[in-house]
Amino acid sequence: MGSNQRRQILIDRMQELDKSGLNCRDCQGTCCTYEANSMMVTPVEAFELYSFLKNQGQFDQELKTRLEETVRTYRLDQSLGNGKKSFLRRTYTCPFFNHKELGCPLPVEVKPFGCLAFNAHHEKEKAGEFCFSEKETLEKREEAFAAAEALENENLKKKYSLYWDKIPLPVALLDFFKFTDADQE
Ligand code: SF4
Ligand code: SF4
């Protein structure tokens, strides 16, 4: 299944809101910072972003350092004391955020589902109570692709030895650095 196809419902809704004047222009991107962002992703979302970054030549040491810094700064993982870690939903400034208006450099085709569903719902008032994630739109997307995606997630978990279903974006991407040399995709 194409990354575009599984996101189309969310992209259509975003464009619909934009036509009504509801968009992210003139906003500094509060929802991508520690003030509001706690994005978690599934294996499918992480893999699509990993593949994109790798193709762009951006899955490199600089990114790794940035991801590690984010995990450390916002304590997105927690040691369980036996060499294992658990991963927590906590707010963090996204390592991809450019700290300016329309500050996400990622194309819609590989953005996490939650990022696409989180939109402005007021023409002038940005952030705060007027920006939110539309649960119905996310559910509609999920229902449409549930069976196929469940299988894809399971296959990716096996292939890449991923022991999680949904974790913070920076932690998920770091897992793919294990495969940068050996990956045949
Ligand atoms: S992926 Fe993009 S839209 Fe999502 S939190 Fe990060 S910078 Fe923001
Ligand atoms: S969803 Fe809201 S907080 Fe996020 S960039 Fe758009 S206007 Fe700003």
Image (spheres, rainbow, N blue to C red):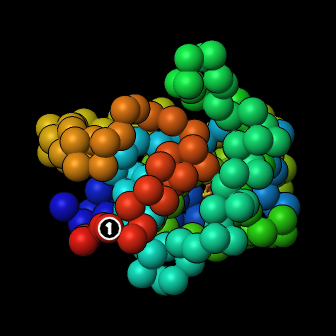
Q: Quadrant where the N terminus lies?
A: bottom left
Q: Nearer the viewer, residue 59 or 41?
A: 59
Residue denoted by label 1: 182
Residue 134 locus on image (x, y percent): 52, 38
Residue 149 locus on image (x, y percent): 22, 44
Residue drawn at the location 25% of the way across and 71% of the way down: 185
Q: Nearer the viewer, residue 3 or 161?
A: 161
Q: Residue furthest front?
A: 82
Residue 174 locus on image (x, y percent): 54, 52
Residue drawn at the location 58% of the way across and 73% of the way down: 60
Q: Looking at the image, is 111 positioned above or below residue 107?
A: above
Q: Circle 1: is it few (<14), some (14-19), or many (20+) Cα within 10 Å?
A: few
Res. 4 in view: no
Whether residue 103 sits left or right of residue 10 in the image: it is right
Q: Residue furthest top?
A: 81
Q: Secondary structure at mark 1?
A: loop
Residue drawn at the location 66% of the way across and 25% of the way down: 78
Residue drawn at the location 37% of the way across and 32% of the way down: 163
Does ligand 1 reach within 8 Å of label 1's beta carbon? Answer: no
Res. 174 in view: yes
Whether residue 84 sits left or right of residue 179 in the image: it is right
Q: Amino acid at mark 1?
A: Ala
Whether residue 156 sits left or right of residue 115 in the image: it is left
Whether residue 155 sits left or right of residue 9 in the image: it is left
Residue 178 locus on image (x, y percent): 44, 56
Q: Looking at the image, is 37 positioned above or below residue 181?
A: above
Give the image quarter of residue 65.
Answer: bottom right
Q: How many marks?
A: 1
Q: Nearer the viewer, residue 14 or 75?
A: 75
